[in-house]
Image: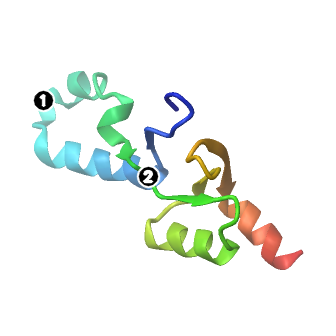
């Protein structure tokens, strides 16, 4: 978050994708040394998907499925961070 705005998001899917690419592109003898130098922005999705406070739950669920996310960012009308809806929140909302 920078000035109230989300600058990126890292999901478990993003980390797995980064590791897969890393192992495909970095020779084995350099992996141990180079993996220690990876930083958050190497895996981060810039301009991650978001929903607003008045977005339907179904929209959040669809984006999460389409983007392989276990959570989605919620922003207010100014685009400022409010919260994160997690998969467990959606399940709880749907069955309770």
Q: Is the image coloured rainbow, by chain, by secondary structure, or in one colour?
A: rainbow
Residue nearest the observer in this picture, 53 or 14: 53
**Which numbered disc flags the more N-terminal residue, 2 or 1?**
1
Q: Describe the element under mark 2 as helix, strand or loop.
A: loop
Residue nearest the observer in this picture, 52 or 86: 52
In the rendering, at what x and y percent does residue 6 appear?
Answer: 50, 40
Q: Describe the element under mark 1 as helix, strand or loop.
A: helix
In the rendering, at what x and y percent does residue 67 appear?
Answer: 44, 66
Tag of residue 13? none
Residue nearest the observer in this picture, 60 or 16: 60
Residue at 30% x, 36% y: name it. Answer: 42
Residue 47 shown left or right of residue 81 in the figure: left
Give neighbour class at mark 2: few <14, some 14-19, many 20+ (Cα, 10 Å): some
Quadrant for the C terminus in the image: bottom right
| Residue hosting label 2 | 48
Give neighbour class at mark 1: few <14, some 14-19, many 20+ (Cα, 10 Å): few
The image quadrant of residue 56 is bottom right
| Residue hosting label 1 | 29
């Amino acid at each position: 978050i920078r000035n109230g705005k989300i600058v990126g998001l890292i999901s478990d899917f993003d980390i797995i994708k980064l590791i897969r690419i890393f192992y495909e592109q970095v020779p084995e003898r350099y992996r141990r040394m180079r993996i220690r130098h990876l930083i958050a922005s190497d895996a981060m999705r810039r301009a991650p998907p978001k929903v607003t406070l008045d977005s339907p739950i179904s929209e959040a669920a669809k984006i999460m499925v389409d983007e392989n996310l276990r959570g989605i960012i919620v922003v207010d009308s100014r685009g400022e961070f409010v919260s994160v809806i997690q998969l467990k929140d959606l399940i709880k909302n749907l069955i309770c």
